[in-house]
Every structure is written in C-alpha cells, then in structure tokens.
Amino acid sequence: MTLRAVEAIAEADVVAYHCARHGRSIARSIAAKHIREDHIEERLMYPLTVETTDHPGGYRGALNDFYEEASARLAAHLDAGRTVAVLAEGDPLFYGSYQHMHKRLAHRYETEVVPGVTSVSAAAATIGKPLVEAEEVLTIIPGTLPEDELTARIAATDSAVVMKLGRTFPAVRRALERTDRLADAHYVERATMEGCRTAPLAGVDPESVPYFSVAVLPSRVDTGPAEPERGEVVVVGTGPAGPQWLTPETRGALASATDLVGYTTYLDRVPVRPGQRRHGSDNKVESERAEFALDLARRGRRVAVVSGGDPGVFAMATAVLEVASQEEYADVPVRVLPGVTAANAAAAKAGAPLGHDYATISLSDRLKPWEVIAERLRAAASADLVLALYNPGSRSRTWQVAKARELLLELRAPDTPVVVARDVGGPEESVRVLPLADLDPDEVDMRTLLLIGSSQTQAVRRGDGSTVAWTPRRYPEAPRTGA
C-alpha cells in the first residue's frame, strides 16, 4: 500500500470493499491492520461471480443492478457528511470493481483516486524480470477473450501480461503455444502476497489456477527470440507500407524469428529487435535470397523472409517454394503468411473497384515476354474483367503503360474509370480516379498501381468533392435469343 492510501483510510469514517458470497475480501485483508474499530464497514457483496443467473437482464443486468445498489449505499454515507474510503486491490481504475462506483458517484461528490500497485508490476517484480525495455510494446490482455483473439493479441506484441486466468487458463496456454511463446511465459499467483506462487507456465496444472493469477511474457531484450527446436522458413508480407498494414500473425512471425532475410527496402519496415540477425540484399536476387534463407533454416534458424504486400502476389513466396522443392530442402518446413496486397489497399482507398470479378497482371517484362503480357491484357479486357496492373513502370521500363493504354482503348470505352494509386500507405500517397483516355503514362512509376474498371465500374462524385469508384456485384444478364 502507498503512504497516501494509508492516510486516506485513516481519514475515512466508512471503509467499503467488494467481496464474493463467502464474505472474504482480498482488498480488506491487505488493509486490515489500518482498519479501526470505529470505522463503519460496508461490505459490498457480489450477487454472483459466474455468468449463470435468472436475472432478466442476464449477467450484465444483475451486475448493473448490484452496482446501482452499492453506489446508493455509499451515497447515503456521503450525503450524511461521512468520508468513504473504497478499498481496491491493485489499482482502483485497472480492471477494478471501484471503477463502477466511480462512474456513478465521482460527478456528484468530491473524489480522490489514490493510485495503487497493479498486479502487472507486482508480478514482474516477483519473477525479477523487466516487462519492457527500449521500444518494446507491452500489451495487457484479459484472459476472458476468445482464444483466437488471445492468440492474435499475443502474436502482435513484444511483451504481455494476461489477466484473469482461472477457468481461462487452458485457452491462454493454447494461445501461447500457438504463437510459440509458451517457453517464455511465467505464471504468477497472488504476487507479493501470502501464498505467492511462481512457475514456468508450461508446467502449471490448470486445475490449480485461481482467478487471481497472471501470465507474464517479459522483455526479450538481452535474451532475443527463443532458439527454435527446429529450423523453419516463414514467408511474410509487410503490406504496401508501414506497420499499420501488418497482420497480428505476421507481427508474431517477425518477432519470433532469429533471422530476417529480404530486400533491404522491405527489411527497413521491420523494427530492429535485439538478438535478431538481418540479412538484406538487392531486389533482383530472389532465388539466391530464398536459397540463403533455406540454408539458415537447415542449420536450425527460424527465418522470416520479408516481402512487401502479400508474399504470394508477385513476391517472394514463389521464389522460396521453388527453391524449397529441390530435394536437398525437402525436410525444411516452409510457411507462407498472407498479407495486404497493393491491389486491395489501392481499391479500398478508391472505394470498391474490385467489387466484382477481376484479373491481376504484372506489366513487367523482366520475367515474361511483352507478347504474353499483351495477350493476357486482351483476354482479360475482352472478358470485361476489372484489371489490377502491378509493376507498371520503372526507370528502365518506360513504355509499357503507354502500350497497355493503347491496347485497352481498343476494347474499353474512353471514359472507363481508372484508379491511379501511388505510394498507398506511404508519406507520398496519392489516389486519383480518372477516365482511361486521360491516363498519362509519364505519371506512372514503380510505386504506382493501376486499377482499370470494367464496363460496369462507376465513378461517382461525392458531396465532399472526392470521387469514388465501385464495381457492382450484379452483372447484367445477356439478352435471351430464340423462340
């Protein structure tokens, strides 16, 4: 307890605390030696502690009625001129019961909230492990979340404390196991109190876990990612730009990797982590990069091969799987994690131009002849598909966009909506919707993606002056012929 908490109890006429039906209160037991005989004690007993009730409003309805009644009892003391001290285990506004009193009373009466030591800080002190250091992120997670959500939250963070274990412990353990964090996890029960218990979480019997216990994933600084029992390669995509485009699964794979392999520009999007090795290279050595990553994995390293966008869309997944198909790498595990690809990112910024069938085509003739590209453009345009055109131009490829525009104008109306999306998600983001006839090839570079509408794609001017593009999901039926 803090000195101010002791003073507040001493100044109070009434000491209130929450408890379960058995009448015992952890908060009162912590403050017991500071409670005087002349204190009026208000025991706020919960009507239920599990979500089984006959209350017409269900579990939440029963609790709301309880908090209203408890607040009314405290208000009666306050109206009589008495000072009330509400005891709260840990910190009053951190998953605490007091916060429900605060919402109902603080706007009506002069209120002081005395901060306390949370179970998070107490647990870290008990196991003697730093929670976070440098740029690490700490996430506080209630164990009552669905298991898939627990898994996503754990995968996306550096350090974590999972609260409210008890019956949730098996799901929390599985979430830690699914994210390869089980070996890092510590179990802490009744931190700093009598009966405190700590242990590696992996070895804890679920039947022995009370509600007042936490799982701790401490800082990785100085320890780095855990050494894998077996090497593997995970191919991940960073999305079209920065960290906001990463999926939780990808964040977890990047955090747990011992080695990062990729084009230097994409590696620069990934935060530097202590103990991780980074292997950057030029963008034109995909096969060599894949072979290097697989060789690392054969030596027991957990390797994340980093792509932009989605790794399976004109990116590194194909290169890795192609090399991994060689007999010498047959036993190396390879996983591909999905990411946000540029076409989806650009489409979302422009509206919904990919709302119906579409084709994705790369205009780069570095890996396939232009004749093949032109044939596919004609076929897709003839089928009236929306087109997502990747790699439209670069410093060494300056004529492809003009040729594609010329070809498409033979098969599409001049007013066909075109989305010109450049640097989506980046500092120079620009997304415009214009007619196909107005497409200027000189404005298109390697950081640009083009979405060419179908005959059904609409471009609509909005009240704020913006233009949105969308393709209806319903396609007009062909007229019937014959008798």
Image (cartoon, rainbow, N blue to C red):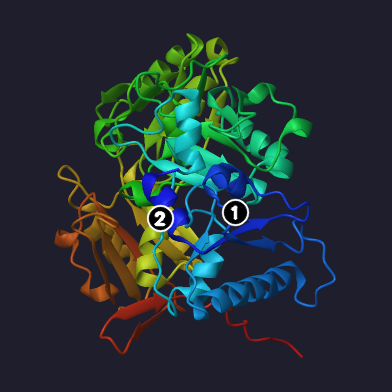
Q: Does residue 317 appear anywhere in the picture?
A: no
In the displayed structure, 337 sits above or below 200; it is below
Point out residue 245 in the picture as x, y percentages from the top left corner: 39, 51
Query: Residue shown at 47%/68% (left/top)?
Result: 83
Quick one: SS at disc 1? loop
- Which one is nearer the viewer's eye here, 9 or 54? 9
Q: Does residue 14 appear anywhere in the picture?
A: yes
> Disc 2 marks which residue?
114
Left or right? Give the position of 243 relative to 301: left
Left or right? Give the position of 297 relative to 182: left
In the displayed structure, 262 sits above or below 416; it is above
Position of the N terminus, as image quadrant, is top left
Quick one: SS at disc 2? loop
Name, please, the residue furthest toward the front.
38
Point out residue 430 in the picture as x, y percentages from the top left corner: 22, 64
Query: Residue shown at 51%/39% (left/top)?
Result: 161
Mark 1 crowd level (few <14, some 14–19, many ≥20, 10 Å Cα): few
Instruction: Give the residue type that dot 2 points to.
Output: Val
Q: CA distance from mark 2 to mark 1?
A: 23 Å
In the displayed structure, 67 sits above or below 115; it is below
Point out residue 423 in the picture as x, y percentages from the top left corner: 25, 55
Point out residue 470 in the picture as x, y percentages from the top left corner: 43, 76
Instruction: Give the residue type that dot 1 points to.
Output: Glu
Of the residues under marks 2 and 1, which one precedes in the sequence? 1
Position of the C terminus, as image quadrant, is bottom right
Is there CB contact under 8 Å for labels 2 and 1? no
> Disc 1 marks which residue?
37
- Which one is nearer the viewer's eye here, 431 or 247? 247
Query: Residue shown at 65%/29% (left/top)?
Result: 195
